[in-house]
Image (cartoon, helix red, strand yellow):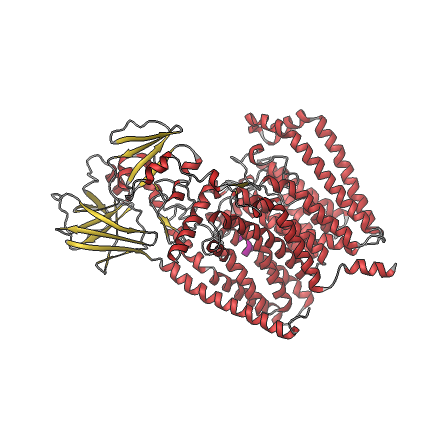
Amino acid sequence: MKKREAVGRTGWADGRMQDGIVLAVLGVLTVILFAGFLFSDRMLFGTDTVPTGYMARKVLSEYLVNEGVLPLWNPYIVGGLPFIDALHGDVLYPATLLNLVMPAHRFIGMKLVLHVFLAGVCMYAFLRARKIGRTAAAVGGLGYMFAPYLVSLIYAGHDGKLYVTSLLPLAFCCLEKGLRSLRAFYFAMMGGSIGLLLLTSHVQMASYVLWALGLYLVFDLAGRRERQRGPGAYGRPVGLFVFGVALGLALGLVQLLPSYIYTRAFSPRAGGVSYEFATSWSLHPEEIVSLAIPQFVHYLGDYWGRNPFKLNCEAPGLVLIVLGNLALCLLWTRRVAAVYFGSLVAFFLSLVTGGALQGVLIALALSGFAVSIWRARGLAFYLLVAVFALFYSVGAHTPVYKLFFYGIPGVKFFRAPSTIMMLFLFSMASMAGVGAGRLEAMAGSKEVRRVAGKILWVVAGGGVVLIALAVGRHGIVGFWERVVLPEMGARRAAVEMNYPHFLRGYAVALALVAGVALCAWLLGDRRVRPGWAVGGLGVLVVLGSWPVDRDFILNIRVGDFVRRDGITERMAGDRSLFRVLPLTGSQIYDRNYLPIFGFQTLNGFHDNRLRIFDEITGEGRLTHPRILDLYNTKYVITGAPISAPGFEELEVRDKMRLYRNRNALPRAFVVYDFEVIEDEGRALERLMEPDFDYRRRVILDTRPRGLAPDSTRAPTPATVEAYGPNRIRIRTETDAPGLLFIGDNYFPYWRAEVDGAPAEVWRCDYAFRAVPVPAGTREVVLRYRSDPLIAGGVVSGASAALILGWLVAHAVRRFRRTGGGGQ
């Protein structure tokens, strides 16, 4: 018996073989979950991926493969905007290299699947660094990688969020190893992780990770008073941490610097966003309940909450929540546990009240959480992060968020507070690993049986509540409408229809909690190997999350949404350079669908457009004939007839009509007459005034040297000989000096040469470009050059070389030390 107990407590085999088994399990389960995608030629559907993300990746893939360089400018939507500076996704993220070996629709999904697997690996590695046993660490890793929060980001098309969430534990793993050993190598690897987070281009979520890493350091320093004394106890870890963060920022500078300057100076977000915009897409009381039971407010087409719609799920998985809270309760006395759960109730009630009562409830919640954190000892960091994430995620539902918005630098540029629930998931998975480990350590004791009994009492109480919920359905819905959601109104029908889903979800939740109790009960049986019982917790983690995960995994054929029709075929026959404006009301046509076929559109979707484009097309001016003409909008697609003069109907297919705008100006031509108006507002007003002849005259914001306006000369055609994302070549033939008008958005990073000599690029007609050209036959070349991108690239390249060199040297030393095959 003693020998069998010893085997059970040590687990499986030894060393690397154990880790290999864990990684194999994580990999096999990943393959099973995504088998429909992996063993097909389909793509993973995402609402922001189809067609918006797919368009950007296709442009990136084709230009990178054909030209051997990255596209720096996107000419296909909203009159043109920077590709990297304006954040077109993970352009510079290393995994993007997959697009060199597979089609765009495949590498998008492959990156997502790979990062789901990496999420589990990184979480497992972090828990192992925290000295959690392998079986318990595997439970935390499984819960993290298959959490609905993470997997549901695939359906939403939020790949950057998924990448950051997946790599977050890696940064903590390196920091933990660094703080334990105080070796610069691990802090350098932490810096590499931070750099990767920044290269995902999701700066907001990368910022959250930096906050949490800094807080982790603070907690470690606070604990050093007991573990270590002396002058180096604090100075060395702080110095190494600063070094690691600096190295990470340097690695990510190639993305961070250009996007920072762009957002500050050229984006609609310049100066920050409004408080109302910043708090949009926050969590609501209904969604707080859904963290435990996702079916309560549900998601996708069954969603009835307060956000406009719900394409993802913030739930971390009920088993993680149970194990995480169990880890806390094993530390506390009953009184502290009662204070903690009372604080949760006070927090929830504060979301549905107002005035003085809300202030009292918030004070009670914060004070109760403070006591709980103080008594949480080794789990205090995770509990604090989880509480912070909850208060942050609910946005305007609590006045506490104003402290974040106005008090934390950079938050006024953020939106969607619910994205911080990544940290909540990380905390829950970490505490769940600890909880599973502590249950395993209690194996064979009567105490673990008592724990199982208490959990069963909770299940029994939950069963009584389930019966009450089923019997009192209309009363429960009416209470929620009267007390929690008075504005429910027409959504009540959706709530009623969803109620059976909620009851089933509640029943499943009770079954999962009962399963946790069963595993704990088995741990009290000396005849059962502890590893098998704790492994049962891992099974429960997967069983609890997969039914929700599968709702967010949809495999589609590219041809089902990317296919030519009569309208696109008709436009494809036009070999000239032009833009098209789709006004169909169809998400497919209007949200970056046409650029997939190489058509440049005047509208389109991008979260970080040029501010001058928004301003010139604002207040309904997008469809103004003058704006259409200036932007070289030759075609308009609409579902309704156009009776305006100058528009000719060319094609009618499936209720969609293609019109040609006969008045559209060419993309480039030379004018000789101009006005100088330095005031931006006045320049836009003048551009739209009926007596301003926009076909023969331009408005400049700077008086040109050596060039006088000439109203007697008619515009001269120019020939666009080459037009690409990074370079444009135009030939002009004039008998007098003039201004080459280019119907693309002005941006100061475009540089011009005329016959090889540098020339200025002026902003004209509020949002367009003008280049002065001498008389005669001239070749004008415009090149996109982002100095912030170049400077950031130099620093990032040097940082990458340092990190990779350090990593290789470390691997070589370790290989030599172990003789190539040690543990």
Image quarter for residue 37?
A: top right
Question: Magenta residues, as a range?
Answer: 207-211
Give me the residue at 61% from left, 60% from top. 173
Q: On screen, 416 above or below 783?
A: above
Answer left or right for 775 relative to 368. Answer: left
Can you give x and y, in whole percent of width and height, for residue 728 in the image? 29, 53
Indicate the position of residue 581 as horizontal and vertical percent values.
Answer: 34, 37
Front residue of 87 and 26: 26
Can the viewer see residue 675?
A: yes
Tag count in the figure? 0
| Observer-nearest of 226 and 561 | 561
Residue 109 belongs to the span the image colors magenta: no
Quarter of the image with the C terminus is bottom right
* Res 500 → quadrant: top right
Q: Is residue 653 left or right of residue 48?
A: left
Viewer-proximal residue, 719 or 582? Answer: 719
Residue 48 as seen in the image, left or right of residue 455: left
Image coordinates of residue 401 in percent, x first then y, are 54, 45
Viewer can see residue 482: no
Taking depth in this image into account, of 603 and 232 the one nearest to the observer is: 603
Q: Vertically, is 42 above or below 505?
A: below
Q: Position of residue 627 (x, y in %)?
A: 28, 38
From the image, give the main secondary structure of the stretch colored magenta.
helix
Quadrant in which the N terminus is drawn: bottom right
Residue 210 on the magenta segment? yes
